[in-house]
Structures are given as structure tokens and as C-alpha cells.
Amino acid sequence: MTTSTAFDPSLTAPRNVQIRRRSSRQWVGRLAVAVTLGGLVLVIVLGIATETTGELLLPGGVTTFIGSMTGLVGMYLALVQVLLIARIPPIEKILGQDGLVRWHRRLGPWPIVLLIAHALFVTIGYAQAARTGMWHEVRALVLSYPDVLAATVGLGLMVMIGVVSFRAVRNRIQRDTWWVIHLYIYLALALSFAHVIVLGPAFVGHPLTIAVWSIVWAATAGTVLVYRFAIPIFRSLTYRLKVAEVYPEAPGVVSVILEGRNLERLAVSGGQFFTWRFLTRGLWWQAHPYSLSALPRPPYLRLTVKAIGDHSSAVARLRPGTPVAIEGPFGAVTPHVRKNTKAVLFAGGIGITALRSLLEDLPREARPVVIMRASSENELVFKDEVAELVRRRKGVLHELVGSREKLGSTRQLLRKLVPDLHKRDVYACGPPGLIEDVVAAASSLGVPRDALHYEIFSW
């Protein structure tokens, strides 16, 4: 292993860690859920209240009403989708990045399905009212009604985003392509807004509905602008990070040392990650998440990257002096979510990057059991640093090298290596299959849900 001349991992990070219980943030999650559900109820109530019995009895009235309601609920859920990926700190700290992604994927199909239903039912309802054919009404709506063509393009963009989100499709395209396609959701929503206000049956002649929805749209747009743009720009200008050094840790794995200013003010916990934007040719337009592999040593930060794609491979070729913009920190795998005093850290491959900084941030009474699992010796990154951190905390380190067939089931390993597992918090980071296996095994061995903390390393 090559050691940085700028960053000394053997030094103690200059910080004092305070344990904060999960319960102190539970009210934030409950409030967010209550506000979201309350907003959905308000949308439905306003949609129903603006409809009259006379309008329902007209030809196509019921069909148009169904189209109106599916459109309102679908658009509301689409805005909730946007907020889920806006990385609002209080919510992200509760759910973690994996939790946000899971909810985003679970909710994802519903706005698209409802908005397709909206387009279909409204078209049928208008055709029934005009006593014309379906395709004639499609042409009339798209070509004659204001902003419907733009809304149709917006719906098409949403459908495209939904298609590339299916796992079978997502696994066949590059992450950068997938990411760019997902950015079109902002354009899709913008294209849809005007026709809702101008033509929506629940809006025409109903100023209260227009006012409520305008506030909802403005609040969503403002939240995205603040958390995805304004705050990252402010932090990047505050810390002025630049690449100081890049050096290999293992085959295909490099550490990047960043130098900045005011890093003593950077509020980051062990186990967290940032989204990094390296401002150099070919990389400036895309941001990728990488974990800190150690706590800050002002004026330095260290992140460690395994080459598994074009972006991560290009990180090894970064030159000293390259400016870096950041977004974050993110991640709920931190010492502050511990329920118990003691902990188990289970790292699969490059997942040790997050757990190495987490280990450094754990108090000495955590007596950690650290399990490093890899296919070969070369993949045991930071094993010397981890061994020293474990020794200082009077913990135990297990290095497991080999295939699953050779090592046995994860459940058997946990039972054998950690007899008091049910009395500890379990932290796990690594590839999807392994971490899902660890979570399932720990649950079956009596570890409560709120004592399981994990991040899956995948795009």
C-alpha cells in the first residue's frame, strides 16, 4: 500500500463525537409523513369539491372527472418523487440514501400510471361530450388546446424515465446515461404545469385550487433549487476543495487526497459520503457519490474509489490542483443512530471505505467486532488501518477471504463470530447481494430493525 505524504491516517481526527439517539429525529419523519398524506388528502378534497352533480350528469362527465382526479393525484405523487431525491437533510438522515432510493422506486410507477390514465380518461370524456371519435379528439386536444402538446411531450418524457428505471433496462445502460435521462423529470414537470392551470376542470374558475397548487409547485421548485443547487454551491465555495494527491491502495482502488479551507467547520460523521464533482474536462458535468475513507484532518480529506465504471476509472487520472465541488454530507450509517453500546461492522469489498471512517468515529466503549469480507487478499483495503483502530477500541477483527461456498453462509458466520450479536448494532456496507444477505441473517438472529444500519454500494 502506498501512503500519502499529505494525509496521515495514523493521527487522531481533531473532533469530539457526541452520541445522539435516533428517537431525537423520529418526530421529523412523522411530521414529513403527516404533511405528505395531508397534502394528498387536500388534493383529493379540492378535486371533489370543484365538481358539481350537473357536470357529472353531462355526457362524458364521469369519465372526465376520473381523468381529472387521476391527473391531480398523479401530479402530486410526481412532485413527492422529486422531493424524495432533493436530499432534504432531516429526511435523508432518517431514511439514508438507500431508504430514499427504495421509496423512490416503490412510488415511481404510480405517478406514470396515473398520468397515463389521466390522459386516456380525459380524452375519452371529451370525445363523449363532443360525440366524436377517440382519435379525432386526440388530434383536437393536441393541436387546438393550449399547452396540451407540451404536456404530451412531458408525459412522454416521464414514460421514458419509467422505462429506463426497470432493473432489466437499467442494468444494460451506463450510469451516466441513466442519470442524464432522469434529469428530464424537471423538464417534464415544467411542461405539464401550464396545461393543468389553464385547462384542468378542477382549476378553471376555482382560484383557491389554483392558489394551493401554485404554492405546492413553487415550494417543490424552491426546495430543489435550495438543496440541489444553492447549498452545494455555497459549500463548494466555502471549502474550496482541490485535488492534492492521488495514490493506489490496491489493484483498481485509489485514494484521493483533497485539500481545502475551513474544513474544521465541515459537519460530517464517520460512515457518510459526499457527491463529488471534479471540475475537469470530461468529468465536470457529472457528480458521483463516494464515501470518505477517514475523518477529516484539516486541511485534508480522503476519499477512496474502486474503478467499476468510466467515472470511477477516470478518478485515478485526476491531476493535483483539480477543483472539486461537493454536495452533502449524506448517509445514515453513522455513530449517532446506535441503539446499543456495542457494534458489529460488516464490510464487503470496497464497502470498507465507509466503515473505516465509521470505526474511527465510534467511541472506545463500542468494543467493535469488524468483519472484512473479500474474494482475495488484494481486496482487503485498509486492513492495517482498520486493525489499528480496532486495537485501540479493544475490539476484534475478522478477515474473511474466499468464495461464499468456502466461507459458508452469512448466518453461520455471524452466529459463530459474534455470539452476542443480538445485543449489538449492526452496520453493513458493500454490494447489493451481500448486504441483503447480512441484513436478513442478522434479523433472523434477533437483531431488531432499528439496530440494523446499512448502505448498498451500487448505482
Image: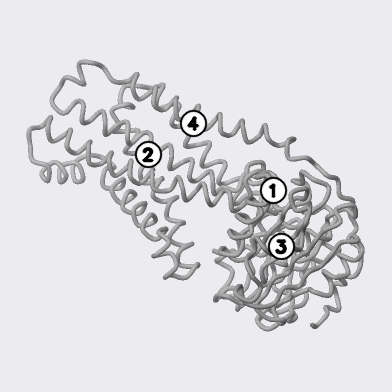
Of callouts 2 and 3, the N-terminal one: 2
Question: Pointer 1: what residue?
Answer: 447
Q: Measuring from the top left, give residue 343's x and y in whole percent.
A: 79, 54
> Looking at the figure, which quarter contains the C terminus?
bottom right
Give the CA distance from mark 4 to mark 1. 44 Å
Of callouts 2 and 4, the N-terminal one: 2
Q: Residues within 10 Å of mark 2 (few under 14, many from 20)?
A: many
Q: Measuring from the top left, give residue 248's x and y in whole percent.
A: 73, 81
Residue 391 left/right relative to 156? right
**Marks 2 and 4: CB-CB under 8 Å?**
no
Give the CA distance from mark 3 to mark 1. 14 Å
Q: Residues within 10 Å of mark 1 (few under 14, many from 20)?
A: many
**Marks 3 and 1: CB-CB under 8 Å?**
no
Amino acid found under the numbered disc labelled 1: Val
Residue 233 appearing in the image: no
Please name the residue shown 77% across and 56% down the image.
419
Question: Pointer 2: what residue?
Answer: 74
Question: Pointer 4: what residue?
Answer: 215
Q: Which numbered marker is on residue 346?
A: 3
Please name the residue shown 49% across and 62% down the image.
179
Which secondary structure lies at badge 4? helix
Taking the view exactly as shown, the residue that stands out farthest to the top is: 53
Give the CA distance from mark 2 to mark 1. 38 Å
Please name the residue shown 28% across and 20% down the image.
51
Tell which tag, 2 or 3, sits nearer the viewer: 3
Tell which tag, 2 or 4, sits nearer the viewer: 2
Question: Image quadrant of residue 223?
Answer: top right
Tell which of 102 and 228 is nearer to you: 102
